[in-house]
Image (cartoon, rainbow, N blue to C red):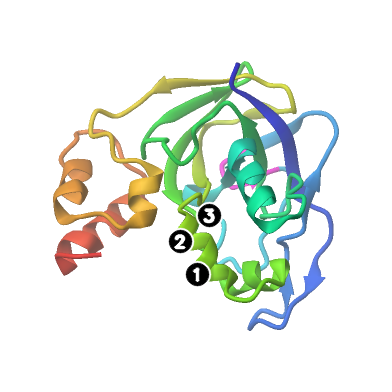
């Protein structure tokens, strides 16, 4: 059964050598249900709100299966929250999720898959691994951002059910690896309601004629 294995939110703000000076990437599992609203989990924050957060990036999900892969190749544990994720999942193909796909979690929470995570300098400093941004990107296991369609609580153990999957079939992994103009057009012509950031990002692919 596809389900949530951990719910994570910021534990403490950390000093960071980036332009903001602090980071909220230090997410850790919490006990019990947490309310999820349009801008994310209750009591969670983002330090750099220019590049993180917002309605189209309200929740970040990462798969146990992808975390286990990185644990093996890195030779270290990858516990829930290490990558800054809010939700750790099991049995959910996050990389294979289709942009616009909808997840029902528990009884009332409904989320929509939007875009892949793009690794940044803050993430690299968090990991302390030389060349981490390029390495993470090359593995193409980015995790997915989601927007909140219907607010509700989430807790470890909650079931995840895919209630809608757009016919265009363009996945988070495809977007992360780089869409062709043809695949970008398939998203825009699908007739599905699209998150504004998805429309902007996919439209840029068409405007350039390349990724």
Could you say which quadrant of the image residue 112 lies in?
A: top left
User: What is the secondary structure assignment of the residue under circle 2?
Assistant: helix
Q: Mark 3 or mark 1, which is nearer the start of the sequence?
A: 3
- Percent position (x, y) of residue 29? 80, 42
Task: Depth check: give the residue in front, 137 or 121.
Answer: 137
Q: Give neighbour class at mark 3: few <14, some 14-19, many 20+ (Cα, 10 Å).
A: some
Task: Depth check: give the residue in front, 19 or 95.
Answer: 95
- Percent position (x, y) of residue 172? 40, 45
Marks 2/1 in contact by CB < 8 Å: the verdict is yes
Residue at the spot of label 3: 54
Q: In which quarter of the image is the N terminus?
A: top right
Of discs 2 and 3, which sits in the foreground? 2
Q: Give neighbour class at mark 2: few <14, some 14-19, many 20+ (Cα, 10 Å).
A: few
- From the viewer's perspective, tell me whether residue 126 is left or right of residue 163: right
Residue at the spot of label 1: 134
Residue at the spot of label 2: 138
Residue shown at the point (14%, 49%) measured from the top left: 182
Q: What stretch is highlighted in magenta?
A: 37-41
């Amino acid at each position: 059964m596809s389900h949530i294995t951990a719910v994570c939110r910021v534990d403490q703000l950390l000093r960071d050598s980036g332009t903001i000076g602090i980071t909220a990437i230090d997410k850790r599992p919490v006990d019990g249900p947490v309310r999820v609203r349009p801008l994310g989990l209750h009591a969670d924050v983002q330090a750099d709100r220019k590049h993180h957060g917002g309605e189209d990036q309200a929740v970040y999900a990462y798969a146990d299966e992808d975390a286990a892969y990185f644990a093996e190749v890195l030779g270290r544990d990858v516990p829930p929250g290490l990558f800054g994720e809010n939700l750790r999942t099991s049995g959910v193909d996050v990389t294979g999720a289709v942009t616009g796909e909808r997840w029902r979690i528990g009884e009332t929470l409904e989320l929509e898959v939007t875009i892949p995570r793009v690794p940044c300098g803050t993430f690299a400093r968090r990991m302390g691994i030389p060349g981490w941004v390029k390495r993470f990107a090359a593995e193409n296991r980015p995790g997915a951002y989601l927007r909140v369609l219907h607010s509700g609580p989430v807790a470890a153990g909650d079931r995840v059910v895919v209630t809608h999957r757009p016919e265009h079939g363009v996945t988070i992994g495809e977007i992360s690896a780089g869409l062709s103009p043809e695949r970008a057009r398939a998203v825009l012509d699908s007739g599905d309601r699209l998150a504004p950031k998805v429309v902007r990002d996919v439209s840029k692919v068409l405007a350039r004629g390349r990724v």
